[in-house]
């Protein structure tokens, strides 16, 4: 999906577009890179006048909902899902194995830190579900990581606007 297409969605559908696009991005769907989406959401919030706080809240809720879907898939689909995913995306095997290792070693701190690392931040939800991390703890530490990630990237778009657009296009 192009930057222009994303901008069109944002200006046409506003808050709903932020929610849907960020939700899909947090489900690790191809074509929705966070490095593009979040700054555009920040730019849209600045230009449309809804305020940064509201745009950030929507993006965090969307990210959390997308993360919950992957967590629940991991929790109830378990190893079957991971085996199928690795078979379909063999290049991700090493990332998933490292993610599981970090979660086992660091627990919730590993989850929080994983939410701040590109690619790990979305995939980490499936192993967290497979490991059956406590859902409340998972939600709290995921929210903190999602908030920080979205704050930085949406904030860049909100405060630096066109300069960020030149970088991401």
Image: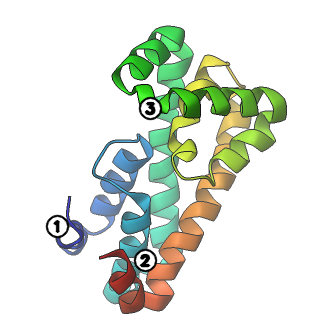
Quadrant occupied by the C terminus: bottom left
Question: Dot 2 corresponds to which residue?
Answer: 42
Marks 2 and 3 sit apart, C-alpha to C-alpha, by: 32 Å
Eye-nearest disc, 2 or 3: 3
First reached walking from the N terminus: tag 2 or tag 3: 2
Residue 150 spot, x, y in % from top left: 54, 64
* Residue furthest out toward the top: 80
Quarter of the rendering occupied by the N terminus: bottom left
Side of 96 where 59 appears, left or right: left
* Above or below, 158 relative to 17: below
Q: Determine the secondary structure under disc 2.
A: helix
Instruction: Residue at 58% x, 72% y: name it.
Output: 152
- Dot 1 lies on which element? helix
- Ranked by sequence position, the earlier of labels 1 and 2 is 1
Q: Residues within 10 Å of mark 1 (few under 14, many from 20)?
A: few
> In the figure, residue 55 lies in which quadrant?
bottom left
Q: CA distance from mark 1 to mark 3?
A: 29 Å
Q: Is residue 83 left or right of residue 10?
A: right
Q: Residues within 10 Å of mark 2 (few under 14, many from 20)?
A: many
The numbered mark at residue 5 is 1
**What residue sits 44% from the left and 32% below the top?**
91
> Which residue appears at 46% of the width and 60% of the height?
59
Q: In the depicted view, which residue is nearer to us: 86 or 48?
A: 86
- Mark 2 vs 3: CB contact within 8 A: no
State the image coordinates of residue 106 (x, y, percent, origin top left): 82, 36
């Amino acid at each position: 999906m192009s930057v222009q297409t994303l901008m069109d969605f944002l200006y046409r559908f506003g808050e709903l577009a932020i929610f849907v696009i960020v939700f899909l991005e947090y489900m690790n769907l191809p074509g929705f890179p966070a490095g593009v989406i979040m700054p555009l959401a920040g730019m849209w919030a600045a230009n449309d006048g809804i305020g940064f706080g509201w745009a950030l809240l929507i993006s965090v809720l969307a990210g959390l909902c997308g993360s919950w879907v992957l967590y629940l898939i991991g929790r109830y689909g378990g190893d079957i899902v991971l085996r199928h995913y690795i078979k379909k995306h063999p290049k991700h095997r090493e990332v998933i194995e490292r993610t599981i290792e970090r979660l086992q070693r660091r627990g919730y701190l590993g989850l929080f830190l994983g939410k701040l690392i590109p690619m790990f931040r979305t995939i980490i939800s499936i192993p967290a579900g497979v490991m059956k991390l406590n859902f409340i703890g998972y939600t709290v530490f995921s929210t903190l990581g999602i908030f920080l990630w979205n704050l930085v990237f949406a904030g860049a778009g909100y405060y630096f606007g066109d300069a960020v657009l030149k970088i991401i296009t």
